[in-house]
Amino acid sequence: MSSEKTTDTSAGGYFSIPSGLGFPVTEKIFTPEKFTEEQKMAAETAKKFIEKEVAPRINEIDEQKGDYALTVKLLKKAAELGFLAIDVAEEYGGAGSDFKTAMCVSEVFGAGGSWAVSWAAHSGIGTHPLLFFGTEAQKKKYLTKLVGGEWTGAFGATEPEAGTDLYGAKTKAVLSPDGKFYILNGNKTFISNSGFADLFTILAKVDGDPKKSACFLVERGTPGFTIGKEENKMGICGSSTCPLNLVDVKVPAENLLGEIGKGIHIIFNTLNLGRLKLGAMTTGSGKYVINDAVKYAAERKQFGLPLSSFGFIKEKLANMVVGAWMTESAVYRTAGMVEERFKATDFKNLPAVLEALREYEIECAILKVAGSEMFWYIADENVQVHGGYGYIKDYLAERYLRDARINRIFEGTNEINRLTAILNMLERAGKGKLPLAKAGAALAAQLEESSGEELSDEKFALQSELVNNIKKMFFVAGGRVLEKFPTRDKIVGEQEILGRLSNMLILIYLSESGLLRAKEHGGEIQEAIVKLYVQNAALEAEKLAKEVLAYLEEGDMLKSYLGRLKRLGRTLANNLLDPVSLQRKIGDKLIEKKKYFL
Ligand SMILES: Cc1cc2nc3c(=O)[nH]c(=O)nc-3n(C[C@H](O)[C@H](O)[C@H](O)COP(=O)(O)OP(=O)(O)OC[C@H]3O[C@@H](n4cnc5c(N)ncnc54)[C@H](O)[C@@H]3O)c2cc1C
């Protein structure tokens, strides 16, 4: 572990907004530059594993049919290196590493395509519910097997008629008259790893009662439990996704996981971790695809010149780097904050880990959205860099794009994660934990008086001011939303508004994370990245805030609100940077280095 304390003043996990309009410029956050030797070594071993074992077999993995023998073989190999349970305590056979190490490995494994999805489903949703909520006896029986790669795991929550709305799940569990078994009946759909998994965590309702949701550990081969036909998917074709059918499946009563009534709670709690890790995995995938793009752009010639010499292509490459670096900054900042909060170097104190993750639920949701959309952007632009060849299956660009798409759908769709982030924040504000409406009103007066202050000549003075201004715009728009819709039931019907506010949150969190990182570790390129991202974020945030207010207000009231935003936008209007030169600087460096280099 790094001896340096990497705190963030955002007590309570809503990134410094509670500290008023202050901006913790002097605070340190955890960043990849602070990786310890242990973390670097784990990442290096993971990289070698992906390069040697997975990448050369990427076609073979995608084409395997039936038993997924290759996927399982590679999972077992990963287990030998401790990669199925990096942050699981040694007493259960895990590697017992710290949480940040687990995040580094997740990032690297992001480059593993379909296989990485199987790995994540196994070591995440397939293992975490048992790890966090299992009894000692259940862990002894199953966890050691999952961690050692002897067995593989899957998680069955989704049903044909209950996807996003898991409360609507119909699978029913009834205790047998002798109290020895739960009898499960129902259908699940889209269950990752089900073609080969040995142990399934199944969400059901005891007696069909909505108040009695519960999870059950169900072994493959249990009579009445059948796995349906593989889905024919758009991407991640080497991962297994099947429906499950349960007809009078007798599950031993001791395989009830956690308490009756807490089944959904188990899912939502473990999802936070899944979302955070998905942020790391998509960061890794994004960087990996950037390497493909820059390689192709340097090799392919048109008009006698490499593609990389053309402004349009350079701009795409630069934007890819900006997206990956900014997301990475937010991912590791969050990992640092979460670990700091549970104050443990491993996962021994499981309730504290869950509590910390709950506290950072907003950030986890933001990272899921930001990471999946960043990766999608990179994969899409990589196809464009490849031109027609990007559309041909012989080229990896085509596969990357198909594989990237699912990240916006599973672990909670991005719509749902956007709602999770903003509703959580507004709820905290409503409970007085975050003075959003008050801050919005206080700002009104402040902005009337403000004549626009001079910027200091500190290196990132403009960007610090812009991030502050984006927050203030959020206060203006979000504060007004709260005044108009003070309760959750009033606000939930306003999704388009919530979506815009959520997008502002994403812009704030990524801008601030990249800025704090660059202040400490910024070279010339990092500086260009932050300048570019923050400027775009400020432009986008102003547009979003205006749209929210235009929906809420009209006439003089609207004019007054727009006036406040205009005053906040003045810093940028008076100090607009030339984005083209910044993009060229980043693009040129990537082309010179021939791969992602930061
Ligand atoms: C390859 C793959 C692997 C998967 N692996 C697993 C797994 O291992 N285990 C598991 O349990 N599930 C798994 N899933 C299921 C996945 O989590 C669901 O597909 C996802 O949660 C969405 O549910 P749905 O498909 O029913 O879409 P729906 O819920 O029908 O949603 C359709 C659209 O409507 C939107 N929508 C829905 N409700 C709302 C609302 N209230 N407000 C606004 N918009 C809304 C959604 O965002 C989405 O855009 C997997 C799915 C796939 C495709």
Image: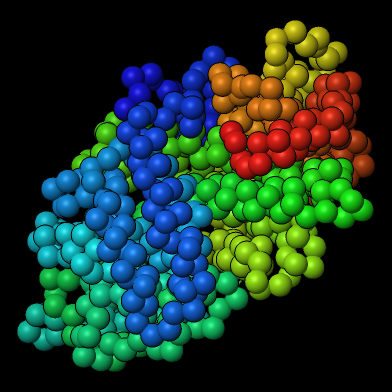
The residue furthest front is: 304
Q: From this view, report whether residue 166 is shown above or below residue 37.
A: below
Q: Say if 587 sits above or below 54 in the image.
A: above
Q: Position of residue 9 (x, y in %)?
A: 48, 23
> Is the C terminus in the top left, top right, bottom left or bottom right quadrant?
top right
Residue 110 in the image: state x and y as whole percent. Answer: 49, 54
- Name the residue nearer the viewer: 464 or 480: 464
User: What x and y, as percent, mark residue 37?
Assistant: 35, 29
What residue lies at 50% left-to-right and 83% top-to-bottom? 231
Q: Check the picture and name the quadrant holding the N terminus.
A: top left
Above or below for 451 versus 568 = above
Q: Is residue 522 above or below residue 175?
A: above
Answer left or right for 79 relative to 24: left
Relative to the observer, which residue lies in front, 223 or 211? 223
Q: Which residue appears at 27% of the width and 51% of the height?
A: 81
Quick check: 514 left or right of 78? right
Q: Residue at x 77, y 30 (%)?
A: 585
Q: Can I make out residue 218 in this image?
A: yes
Among the 4 quarters of the image, the one containing residue 70:
bottom left
Q: State the image coordinates of residue 394 (x, y, percent, origin top left).
A: 65, 71
- Residue nearer the viewer, 101 or 17: 101
Identify the residue shown where x is 22% and y is 50%: 94
